[in-house]
């Protein structure tokens, strides 16, 4: 196989400026809306210009490469990747996560479009170096990092993966009603939802939940002291779950609110929500599974790992 015989899929996303134009239709209306709120519209323009420059450099490298295709993030849920595709994500860390969960082990290259703006934990490369990285990946000379993914599987066969975390709960600001089971423990609960985090996501949403819970406990009990939160490695074989704001009552318990999930011991959930119950992952609320009364979900470690080029 020659270097350029493999197709490269470039995943892009709209900038904040483009989102504003889509909502307000004209530049003048978008500018008026932002400045009326007291924000700096020039920052939106600067970010958009930087992304456009990075996109131009990236496409130039792909034209030199050979076969390539550009895919907007919104099309990922229905896009079919070939087994030998090389995938490139140009955007923030979230775009890398949003792309990885739809892959089946294909190498994923994260490009930072604006290093001065984005830290880019998952974006180790810049567009100017893409050509050399692609050549190394095609020849198997570039190291990769395995990333454990979570998976929610419904009783009707639907499956949703997560690179950072899964959310199980109400679509609106209401109570989630469900039965939760882990190993020999099982109880009915009412809460604002459940977060299930991977190792990669252990520095994100789940960290906020745990840190907030510890802070509230210390304040209520008048305790003091430093709390050291330890994230998991990206390839951890375990997931961590936390129940948000569990409400104890005669009909609901609050004992099974935190723990570890593995392939041998998955988390099982049965929805008691007549409507608005959902499962979504990595912050993409528009790509969700309906989780309403009678549905069962099994949450565990996905059999497939992500493959991040480093």
Image: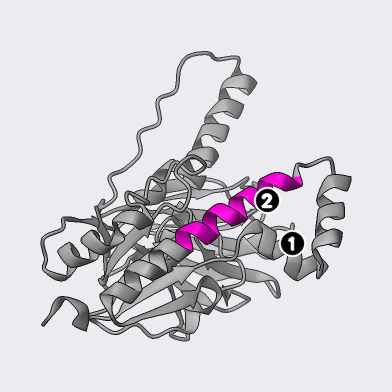
- Gap in angstroms between the C-alphas marked 1 and 2: 9 Å
Q: Which mark is residue 20?
A: 1
Task: Decide: is 158 above or below 227.
Answer: below
Mark toward the viewer: 1 or 2: 2
Q: Quadrant of residue 279?
A: bottom right
Q: Is residue 109 magenta?
A: no
Helix, strand or loop at mark 1: helix
Task: Decide: is 42 above or below 52.
Answer: above
| Residue 145 shows up from this direction | yes
Q: Is residue 43 magenta?
A: yes
| Residue 299 shows up from this direction | no
Q: Residue at x 39, y 60 (%)?
A: 163
> Residue 302, image x and y in percent?
31, 68
Q: Label 2 belongs to which residue?
A: 44
What residue span does the magenta drawing correspond to?
Answer: 41-55
> Residue 174, image x and y in percent?
74, 58
Determine whether, in the image, residue 125 is placed left or right of residue 172.
left
Q: Residue at x 27, y 74 (%)?
A: 65
Are the residues flagged by discs 1 and 2 in contact, CB closer than 8 Å?
Answer: yes
Determine whether, in the image, residue 4 is placed left or right of residue 240.
left
Does the magenta stretch mainly form a helix, a strand or a loop?
helix
> Residue 168, image x and y in percent?
55, 62
> Residue 28, image x and y in percent?
85, 60
In the depicted view, which residue is nearer to us: 151 or 233?
233
């Amino acid at each position: 196989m020659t270097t350029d015989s493999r197709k490269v899929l470039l995943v892009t996303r709209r900038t904040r400026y483009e989102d504003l134009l889509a909502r307000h239709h004209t530049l003048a209306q978008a500018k008026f809306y932002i400045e009326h709120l007291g924000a700096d519209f020039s920052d939106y323009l600067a970010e958009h210009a930087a992304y456009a420059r990075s996109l131009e450099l990236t496409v130039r490298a792909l034209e030199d490469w050979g076969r390539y295709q550009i895919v907007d993030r919104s099309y990922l849920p229905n896009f079919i990747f070939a087994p030998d595709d090389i995938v490139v994500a140009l955007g923030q860390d979230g775009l890398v996560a949003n792309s990885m969960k739809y892959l089946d082990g294909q190498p994923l290259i994260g490009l930072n479009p604006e290093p001065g703006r984005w830290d880019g934990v998952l974006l180790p490369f810049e567009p100017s170096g893409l050509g050399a990285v692609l050549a190394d990946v095609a020849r198997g000379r570039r190291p990769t990092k395995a990333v454990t993914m979570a998976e929610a599987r419904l009783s009707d066969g639907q499956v949703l993966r997560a690179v950072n975390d899964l959310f199980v709960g109400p679509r609106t600001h209401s109570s989630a009603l469900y039965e939760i089971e882990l190993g020999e423990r099982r109880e009915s609960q009412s809460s604002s939802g459940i977060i299930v985090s991977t190792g990669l996501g252990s520095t994100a949403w789940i960290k906020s939940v745990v840190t907030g819970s510890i802070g509230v406990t210390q304040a209520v009990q008048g305790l003091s002291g430093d709390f050291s939160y330890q994230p998991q490695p990206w390839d951890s074989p375990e997931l961590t779950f936390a129940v948000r704001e569990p409400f104890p009552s005669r009909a609901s318990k609050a004992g099974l609110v935190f723990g570890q999930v593995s392939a041998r011991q998955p988390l099982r959930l049965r929805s008691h929500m007549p409507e608005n119950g959902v499962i979504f992952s990595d912050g993409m609320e528009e790509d969700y599974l309906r989780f309403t009364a009678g549905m069962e979900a099994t949450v565990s470690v996905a059999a497939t790992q992500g493959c991040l080029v480093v």
